[in-house]
Image (spheres, coloured by chain):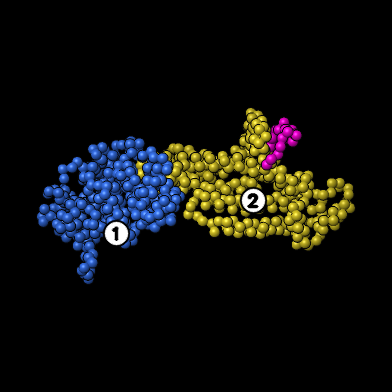
Chain colours: A blue, B yellow
């Protein structure tokens, strides 16, 4: 664990502006990621997980802005890079795959065109070299008949196949970090499993670090070395995966784990956490989870609990047994 | 694709029949005497009028007359146009290339500047550059074409003497009808190049400038708007984010990725405008005394030259069908998701 982190996020705040009002979406997120580790960022819609991922590569929509904080890649702050410097990081050092693979590929360019342009842009390969490399990449992500499929268009691929292409594209330049933003949400369950297995397998071959963003704790348990639980734009709990699944300390994480369906037991009711999560940017004082928390006290509603660390386990809660 | 083209070409005669019959039927509302009068040069020969009516069977029933006209058309004879003082088919052959040339140059201007302004406007959305581009395009859109045309003519011909009206100068007329100038295509610009005669080329081009600019201004505004909104829509799509995430330059993201998708609606618009220009440059051709098909159509209509009117409409109908077919084919070239069958 003494390795120097490849990515450090320090007190990241992101705000959305709409109708001249400012809505904080991320309220001070910090973590560091060591090379070769898989970090799962788990959270509900509006928890800020995708926004955090987009801010790493400065891909936020125009309405959103990083208001403070640092994102250090090998010690270099990504937030202060010039557009030109940013281009060399994007794709080459940090690659990203997205939620809806079919919409994430350009409909009027061939798969080959979209794969090779990355290689040509960063590695200055010739067209012929890049085509050979692209075919090899497709084969590597499990697409057969690669040479022929290079000339096809995204609409001729299924969703799962498109995600494989996206993964091939992300792997093209052997990045240090892969950000996977809900890569299986738009796919059906059997394909989901294949894609997860593929990502896991490629991660083990290449030893890249992966930030795996999902709302699905079960998925996170399959891939992650460590899990970070986001709620209302705040880190609620962050621990090595085995530790978190065995000794979840935060009531929210416990609730999430309790509501996981199991194949072996068939309970009458699937336990769920009552209430609604705060909407993105909603104002609150105290702990954002307090309104839904069975252990909440007046103190929880008044002041925001600090993130306390014991060993490798970080948790944000006043509740005594959480410590 | 092939079957689609064949099917559309089978439709062509039906469209032509519909259009020409409608017009033919309307001309029948005029009395036979009125229709015959154009062919009688001397007003004192009243007897000749009856002669013409009998000779051409102008009192026959509509269908019979239409059938007779159609029979001749199939044989390649479109009749004689008194207003142009030559057979209709020769008039079409002589005037059409000039109009195609004008429409083509106009569309190059429209597409080039329209796309460029539209992208520029979209990329700088809500900044001053965007406002400027929009003001210019709305301004152009609101200017009546005949006012603009006359103003340009007054300034650039009347005051500055840079660009003359007409299709070409007197000297050019001498050259192109002289023994050393070969007519290969009928398009003067192309023929001038093929003959290696740059003086003719320059002269014809300089006569094209004012009418082309005038035509361009109105279409240009629409093009900017379509390109701008199309570009804005595409720039918000997820594949654009992917392109950025790959580390492509902003130039590549905008032009290659978003641009290639945004141009699709522009192509439809451009082909519709091009076809419309072929039959509808009437006002501009009249203002600039440009020897094109529009001016021929106007003269024919003004003088009740029925053979001319029918020939003109027949040609416009054919061009419309072919133009639409061409735009469909163009569509498949830019959007791989579209298959014609």
Residue B18: give x, y in percent of width and height.
67, 59
Residue underneath mark 2:
B319
Residue extending farthest to the bottom is A268
Instruction: Write the residue at 82% across / 54% down.
Output: B33
* Count of labels in the image: 2
Residue B140: give x, y in percent of width and height.
55, 40
Seen from the viewer's position, the closer of residues A19 and B200 is B200
Label 2 vs label 1, nearer the camera: 1
Q: Residues within 10 Å of mark 1 (few under 14, many from 20)?
A: some
| Main SS of residues in magenta | loop
- Observer able to see residue B292: no
Instruction: Write the residue at 66% across / 59% down.
Output: B14
Residue B176: give x, y in percent of width and height.
72, 35
Q: Residue B23 lies in what quarter of the image?
A: bottom right
Residue range in magenta is B166-185
Seen from the viewer's position, the closer of residues A277 and A119 is A119
Residue underneath mark 1:
A193
Give the spatial CA distance, label 2 vs label 1: 56 Å
In the rendered image, the vertical position of residue A298 relative to residue B287, given as above or below: below
């Amino acid at each position: 664990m003494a390795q120097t982190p490849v990515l450090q996020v320090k007190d990241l705040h992101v705000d959305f502006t709409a109708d001249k009002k400012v809505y904080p979406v991320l309220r001070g997120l910090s973590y560091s990621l060591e090379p070769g580790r898989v970090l799962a960022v788990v959270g509900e819609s509006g928890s800020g997980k995708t926004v955090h991922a987009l801010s790493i590569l400065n891909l936020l929509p125009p309405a959103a802005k990083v208001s403070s904080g640092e994102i250090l890649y090998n010690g270099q702050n990504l937030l202060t890079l010039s557009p030109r410097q940013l281009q060399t990081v994007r794709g080459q050092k940090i690659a990203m795959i997205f939620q809806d693979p079919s919409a994430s590929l350009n409909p009027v360019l061939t798969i080959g065109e979209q794969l090779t342009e990355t290689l040509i842009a960063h590695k200055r390969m010739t067209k012929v070299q890049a085509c050979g490399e692209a075919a090899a990449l497709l084969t590597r992500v499990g697409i057969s008949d690669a040479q022929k499929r290079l000339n096809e268009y995204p609409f001729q691929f299924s969703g799962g196949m498109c995600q494989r292409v996206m993964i091939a594209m992300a792997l093209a330049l052997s990045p240090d970090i892969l950000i996977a933003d809900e890569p299986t949400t738009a796919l059906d369950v059997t394909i989901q499993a294949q894609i997860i297995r593929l990502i896991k397998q490629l991660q083990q071959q290449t030893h890249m670090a992966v930030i795996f963003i999902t709302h699905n704790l079960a998925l996170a348990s399959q891939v992650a070395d460590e899990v970070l639980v986001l709620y209302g734009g705040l880190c609620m709990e962050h621990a090595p995966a085995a530790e978190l699944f065995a000794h979840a300390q935060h009531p929210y994480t416990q609730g999430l784990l309790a509501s996981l369906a199991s194949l072996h037991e068939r309970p009458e009711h699937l336990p769920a956490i009552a209430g609604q999560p705060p909407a993105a940017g909603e104002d609150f004082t105290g702990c954002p989870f307090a309104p839904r928390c069975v252990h909440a006290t007046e103190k929880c509603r008044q002041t925001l609990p600090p993130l306390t660390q014991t060993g490798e386990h970080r948790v944000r809660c006043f509740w005594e047994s959480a410590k | 694709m092939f079957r689609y083209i064949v099917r559309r070409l089978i439709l062509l005669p039906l469209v032509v029949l519909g259009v020409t019959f409608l017009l033919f039927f309307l001309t029948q509302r005029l009395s036979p005497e009125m229709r015959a009068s154009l062919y009688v040069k001397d007003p004192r020969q009243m007897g000749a009028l009856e002669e013409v009516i009998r000779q051409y069977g102008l009192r026959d029933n509509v269908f019979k007359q239409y059938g007779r006209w159609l029979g001749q058309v199939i044989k390649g004879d479109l009749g004689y146009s008194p207003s142009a003082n030559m057979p209709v088919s020769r008039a079409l052959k002589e005037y059409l290339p000039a109009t195609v040339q004008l429409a083509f140059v106009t569309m190059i201007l429209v597409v080039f500047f329209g796309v460029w302004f539209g992208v520029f406007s979209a990329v700088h959305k809500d900044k001053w550059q965007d406002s400027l581009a929009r003001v210019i395009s709305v301004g152009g859109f609101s200017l009546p074409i005949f006012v603009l045309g006359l103003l340009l003519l007054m300034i650039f011909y009347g005051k500055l003497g840079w660009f003359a009206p007409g299709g070409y100068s007197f000297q050019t007329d001498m050259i192109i009808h002289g023994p050393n100038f070969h007519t290969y295509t009928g398009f003067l610009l192309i023929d001038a190049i093929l003959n290696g005669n740059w003086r003719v080329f320059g002269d014809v081009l300089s006569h094209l400038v004012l009418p082309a600019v005038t035509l361009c201004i109105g279409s240009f505004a629409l093009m900017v708007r379509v390109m701008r909104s199309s570009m804005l829509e595409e720039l918000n799509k997820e594949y654009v984010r992917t392109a950025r995430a790959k580390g492509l330059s902003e130039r590549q993201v905008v032009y290659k990725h978003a641009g290639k998708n945004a141009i699709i609606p522009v192509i439809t618009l451009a082909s519709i405008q091009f076809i419309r220009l072929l039959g509808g440059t009437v006002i501009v051709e009249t203002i600039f005394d440009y020897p094109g098909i529009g001016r021929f159509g106007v003269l024919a209509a003004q003088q009740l030259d029925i053979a001319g009117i029918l020939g003109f409409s027949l040609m416009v109908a054919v061009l419309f069908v072919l133009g639409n077919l061409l735009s469909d084919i163009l569509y498949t070239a830019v959007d791989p998701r579209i298959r014609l069958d």
